[in-house]
Amino acid sequence: MRDPRISAIGKGLRRRGRLMAQAVSPPRRHLDAMPAPRPAADGYTAPRAPRLVDSPVFVLSSVRSGSTLLRVLMNSHSRIRAPHEMHLRTLHVHLSREFTDDAMRALALDKEELEHVLWDRVLHLELQRSGKDVIVDKTPPNTLIWPRLHRCWPHARYILLLRHPGAVVASLTARRDDPDHEAIRTEVLGYAEKLEEARQQLDAHVMTYEELTAEPEKSTRGLCEYLGVPWESGMLDYGSQDHGVFRPQLGDWSSTLKSGRVQPARTADPDTELPPRLTELARAWGYPDGAPPR
């Protein structure tokens, strides 16, 4: 019979090795802050627990694509709650002891499903506080993990908000001090690839920032039809309502957004250099010749 003391020592050494590896590992620098789920050593995957919010709405977009404007327009509707960016993907569960995993498994849960339950509870709590019946999360990096959102909420609905990649590059470049142009193009391409993936695989409502700013009533009417709620003219008067704080990491905080009025989209320099793939995606999204709109 194996000495239980030897087994305990072995577990302790393995755990110490994992902690040391984590301590010396370099920080993650790529866009996706949520790594792919790692199955348990024996392949166990917990079944999906019941959800309090069955069909939340997610806005998938690149950064600097007008998602905060879309948020406040939707939040001005009497039935739609669209709070600031919630960053659910960075909300993690930590199973601190080996027996914690065993205890959760006995409840038909694992780390990923525990996080899904937590995310669902956050949305449900916010929806209850608002007194509304439709919840929208418009955090742009959700675009990078949309397959996991789909696993968490199979009945979720999606709004794809597109903007010409050249305009996104120009906006990011103008926003940043001492911009790294190559890094910006790489960042925009990362978002664009996941948006195109979602566009091809999801039954989503697709709209563009250019259309939203040029014809806000038409765009919001189409959006309301998709969400199954009646259009309300008050959506266009978003400045008359309270949408919470506007500050970095929670959404756009520009004077344009704070003006309380939908303003024309800023055009990009037509000479903005784009990687061939971004030009190809711009064409696929309906931008003539892949050129930025004037």
Image (cartoon, rainbow, N blue to C red):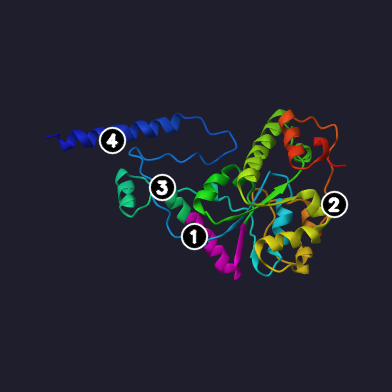
Label 3 crowd bin: few (<14), some (14–19), many (20+), radius 10 Å: many
Q: Can you tell which quarter of the image residue 127 is in? A: bottom right
Circle nearer the viewer, 4 or 2: 2
Percent of width and height locating residue 268: 83, 39
Q: Percent position (x, y) of residue 135?
A: 60, 61
Look at the image and tell me whether residue 14 can be seen: yes
Give the camera-side residue of 274 and 16.
274
Q: In the rendered view of the protein, which quadrant contains the N terminus?
A: top left
Picture disc at residue 121: 1
With 130 as the anchor, is 276 left or right in this view? Answer: right
Tell me which amino acid carries mark 3: Lys
Q: Amino acid at mark 1?
A: Arg
Mark number displayed over residue 111: 3
| SS class, disc 1 | helix
The residue under label 4 is 12
Where does the magenta region start and end? Answer: 118-136
Residue 265 is tagged as none
Does dot 4 land on a helix, a strand or a loop?
Answer: helix
- Eyeballing the image, is 34 above or below 229? above
Contact (CB < 8 A) between labels 1 and 4? no
- Per the model, the C-alpha gap separating discs 2 and 3 is 45 Å
Which badge, 2 or 3, is on the more N-terminal residue? Answer: 3
